[in-house]
Image (cartoon, grey):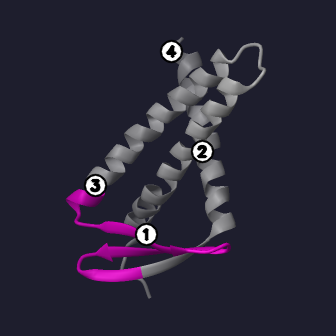
Amino acid sequence: MTKIPEDVKNMIEKSIYLPMTLTVLNRDISIIEQSPFKLKQPYLHLIEESLKLIQHDLYEVKRQLKKQHISVSKVKSDEAFTLYSFLYQGFEEQHNYFNPRIRNRVSELMEGYLFKASSTKFNNG
């Protein structure tokens, strides 16, 4: 049984997923820059705005983890699972994450941040 409350677990998981989301979007920027799109700038701008939102959220998550003395570390990874260790209030817990589930969650976050960035742009622009 886990000793980590659900809200803290959600924050911990954000500290895992958000850096992955940043990595994917940064890779996508380099792919778009090399692509034969006629108008690359709208795609690049949308991704760059999404990156700003993600970086802000990741900063807040890391700040909260530090404030609450919570650490998260990747222990090992194979083709199917990735094992993370969480240190929370003096207790260590290890959680195994199914890699396709990680990929799906990162995809959901990407969609959410891209939508949020586009909504912000159209509502403010």
Mark 3, other Cα within 10 Å: few <14 / some 14–19 / many ≥20: some
Q: Which residue is mark 2?
A: 24
The magenta stretch spans residue 75: yes
Residue type of the residue flagged with mark 1: Glu
Res 112 → quadrant: top right
Give the mark nearest the N terminus, 2 or 4: 2
Mark 2, other Cα within 10 Å: few <14 / some 14–19 / many ≥20: some
Where does the magenta region start and end? 64-93
Mark 4 to mark 3: distance in Å?
Answer: 29 Å
Residue type of the residue flagged with mark 3: Gln
| Element assignment for label 4 | helix
Q: Which residue is mark 1?
A: 6
- Whether tag 1 and tag 2 are in contact, CB under 8 A, the answer is no
Residue lying furthest top:
125
- Whether tag 4 and tag 3 are in contact, CB under 8 A, the answer is no
The magenta stretch spans residue 53: no
Q: Is residue 80 left or right of residue 109?
A: right
Q: Is residue 118 left or right of residue 89?
A: right
Q: Nearer the viewer, mark 4 or mark 3?
A: 3
